[in-house]
Image (spheres, rainbow, N blue to C red):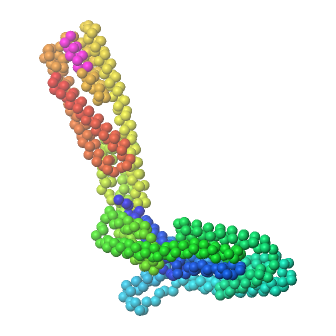
Amino acid sequence: MMEPREQSESMNNLEKDQILSTEPQNEPQEVVSEEVKVVETAPVEETPAEVAAPVEEAPAEPVDEAPAEPAAPVEETPKLDLANKSKSELVEMMRQMAARPIEEVKDEVQAIKAAFFALRHEEISKEKEEFLANGNEESDFTAKEDAEENVLKELLNVLKERRSEYNAAQEANREANLEKKRQIIALINEIANDPDNINRQFNRVKQLQQEFKDTGEVPATADTEVWKEFQRATERFYDVLKVNRELRDYDFKKNLELKQQLCEEAEALDEEADIVAAFRKLQELHTNWREIGPVAKELREELWARFKAASSAINKKYQTFFEDRKSKEKENADAKTALCEQIEQISTDNLKTYAQWDEVTKQIIALQEDWKKLGYASRKANAALFARFRKSCDEFFAKKAEFFKSMKEELSANLAKKTELCERAEALMDSTDWKEASEKFVEMQKEWKTIGPVVKKYSDTVWKRFIAACDHFFDQKKKQNVNIHAVEHDNLKAKKEIIATLKETIENGGEEAAQKVRELMDRWQGIGHVPFKEKDKVYAQYKELIDKAFDTLNMRGSRPSGDGGSRGGRQSFNERGLSERDRLVRTYEQRTSELKTFENNMGFLTANTKSGNSLVQEMERRIARLKEELAELEQKIRDIDNA
């Protein structure tokens, strides 16, 4: 389960994103998710009906064919990142646009304007909702004046004036270009009217032709006519000019090669996967065609037919592309409508726990992921559907925020309790009273389990602090157990030495052998535990030698089995046995209690710590060790009872 702080922070990030209202220029940028952001940018709108088919050339003309009318330019969506921008940031961006050349910022201005008024529209909607919620009539509502909106409008007015000035300057420039081109045409006609000197004017006419091409745009209404006048003047010059046939044929040949290359490039566009890119490239080819001079008269009609056929194929694909896109947009609109209906059916009335909120949050995010995978609907439908979908998302996460806010005091109280446990654990972690400290740590761990969650920001920190104190204590205890293992091996070595001495004493015999055996028996009783795996083996060797000693050394009254010896001897052995038995029974009861405590603590350790693997393993080893000790104690008690 996610901690509430983590969910709350994600929700707050989402609240900062606002839905952009639809302006005619741009699609909205969508951000619909608490953790997932869906960004949609307006598709390129290119109306097939606006695409002009190339105009057929007039083969009978002596110079060249008429150019194809250029198609309407493809609108480019401004590449601005307006997601998560506030009104102040958008105003500042508009101010930056106002400082740039007016011809560079048309689309960017429209995009910023659309984004700003989307935010403004949302503010007004909220004002209106509050106004109506207070019992007022809708007809009485008037939006509050917005200072940032006034600044934006002032900047837009400045840009509008600059745009007007720029357009006027451009129009004046086009008029000047028209006048210049007409002057060039007049000069060519004047040269053609002087046949006596026409041969000397060939280079001059070529220069005038280049000047005509280099001159910029003219008013659209005069473009075709002035181009035809120029062609007629040029053709008249060539008709009058008695130039070398070779030169004219060379010019025709060069133009033929260039136009054949354009035909090949146009035909290759049929293989282009991106039909929009292919269409744009076709417009460039038509522009280049216009700039190339004439070809031989007998080749003009055939060459133009080839170029026109390639152009028609691309235009047909371009038309089909937009028809298919409209069909796909309809499918996307239906799919987005279904997602809106699905998210609107989700109810939050019965969500009372973090787990329930998290489960529904996963459903919301899954729907947002599905939305993200869908393509665009139509411009108008896409904006309305997105606003509808975003509204449902915002309402859900707003209610989720209210729920987490209501839990804030409880989370703070839980943090205080867990912090207090950390302090207690840290105060106890260096204790060497292993039994008592272990019991207290186990109790603190049980208490930790009863405390609820804390704010995500502190959850990992306070848990790591607590488990660090626990790990420190049990690591120290583990080291102590390692020391115990070393002592057991020392005890094993000592008992093996006693066995060797017993064997040697029995074999050598003698008057003092019996006394020496008794001393070795006393030493054996004073030695502590040996490793569990060795205890049965070493004890069997010891018992076998003791039995042999009692049989061969005439040790009356001391035989553990009670065979032979005087009454007084048996009483001495029994008294020692009963005293040893009491000690063993008390040790057995103590080990039983420890075993029960460790077994009760295993559940907490396996369920509450990632780093508990080593601690759990140590607990398991300790439990196994206690069971071994209990088995050994039972055996010793039985031996004493049998004796």
Quarter the C terminus occupies: top left
Q: Is residue 547 located in the magenta-colored stretch of the structure? A: yes
Residue 174 lies left or right of residue 53; in this view the side is: right
Quarter the N terminus occupies: bottom left
Q: Residue furthest left?
A: 567
Task: Give the quarter of the image for residue 497.
Answer: top left
Look at 41% across and 60% down and name the residue there: 456
Residue 214 lies left or right of residue 423; in this view the side is: right
**Above or below 139: residue 119:** above
**Residue 295 screen position, x and y as percent:** 70, 74
Look at 40% across and 83% down and name the residue there: 129
Circle count:
0
Say if residue 609 shows up in the picture.
Answer: yes
Q: Is residue 74 located in the magenta-colored stretch of the structure? A: no
Look at 26% across and 8% down and name the residue there: 509
Q: Nearer the viewer, residue 39 or 492?
A: 39
| Secondary structure mainly formed by the magenta segment | helix
Q: Residue furthest bottom?
A: 139
Look at 51% across and 73% down and name the residue there: 317
Q: Nearer the viewer, residue 286 or 58?
A: 58
Say if residue 158 shows up in the picture.
Answer: no
Report the magenta residues as a range: 541-552
**Residue 439 screen position, x and y as percent:** 30, 45
**Residue 26 screen position, x and y as percent:** 52, 77
Task: Give the quarter of the image for residue 547.
Answer: top left
**Above or below 495: residue 603:** below
**Residue 573 screen position, x and y as percent:** 18, 21
Task: Give the quarter of the image for residue 401.
Answer: bottom left
Q: Nearer the viewer, residue 360 or 68?
A: 68
